Image (tube, helix red, strand yellow):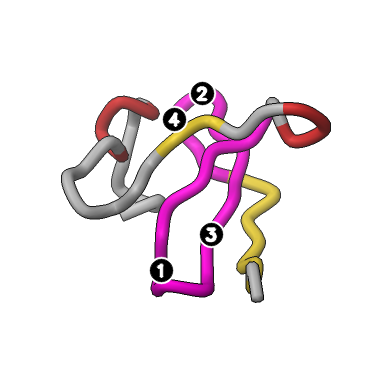
């Protein structure tokens, strides 16, 4: 999905938990992978980059 999206709005899919982060990560967006895991990334000019998988627990 990150590779095919051309706009950040295309990633706002029901069930993905998509949202923009705040604070030190305010340039990043997040989507839910599982209850404990999130993918965070920056998105610019139709490309996702600085992609990382975070374990919240």
Which residue is located at x 44 percent, y 35 percent?
19
Which one is closest to the eye, mark 1 or mark 2?
A: 1
Which one is closest to the eye, mark 1 or mark 4?
A: 1
Q: Nearer the viewer, residue 27 or 47?
A: 27
Q: Horizontal placement of 15 versus 30: left or right?
A: left
Of callouts 4 and 3, the N-terminal one: 3
Which residue is located at x 70 percent, y 49 percent?
50
Q: Does the residue at mark 2 contact the one at mark 4 (Cβ under 8 Å)?
A: yes
CA–CA distance in space, label 2 to label 4: 4 Å
Q: Residues within 10 Å of mark 3 (few under 14, many from 20)?
A: some
Which residue is located at x 34 percent, y 48 percent?
17
Quadrant (top left, top right, bottom left, bottom right) of the C terminus: bottom right
Write down the residue under mark 3: 39
Magenta region: 27-48
CA–CA distance in space, label 1 to label 2: 24 Å
Q: Does the residue at mark 3 contact the one at mark 1 (Cβ under 8 Å)?
A: yes
Q: Nearer the viewer, residue 48 or 41?
A: 41
Of callouts 1 and 4, the N-terminal one: 1
The furthest residue to the front: 57
Element type at mark 4: loop
Residue 1's label in the rendered image is none
Asked if residue 9 is positioned above or below residue 29 in the image, the reply reads above
Q: Residues within 10 Å of mark 1 (few under 14, many from 20)?
A: some
Quadrant (top left, top right, bottom left, bottom right) of the N terminus: bottom left
Write down the residue under mark 4: 46
Residue 49: percent from the left, percent from the top?
Answer: 62, 46
Write down the residue under mark 1: 33
């Amino acid at each position: 999905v990150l590779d095919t999206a051309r706009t950040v709005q295309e990633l706002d899919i029901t069930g993905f938990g998509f949202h923009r982060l705040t604070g030190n990560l305010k340039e990043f967006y997040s989507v839910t992978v599982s209850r404990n895991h999130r993918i965070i990334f920056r998105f610019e000019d139709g490309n996702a980059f600085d992609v990382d998988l975070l374990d919240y627990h």
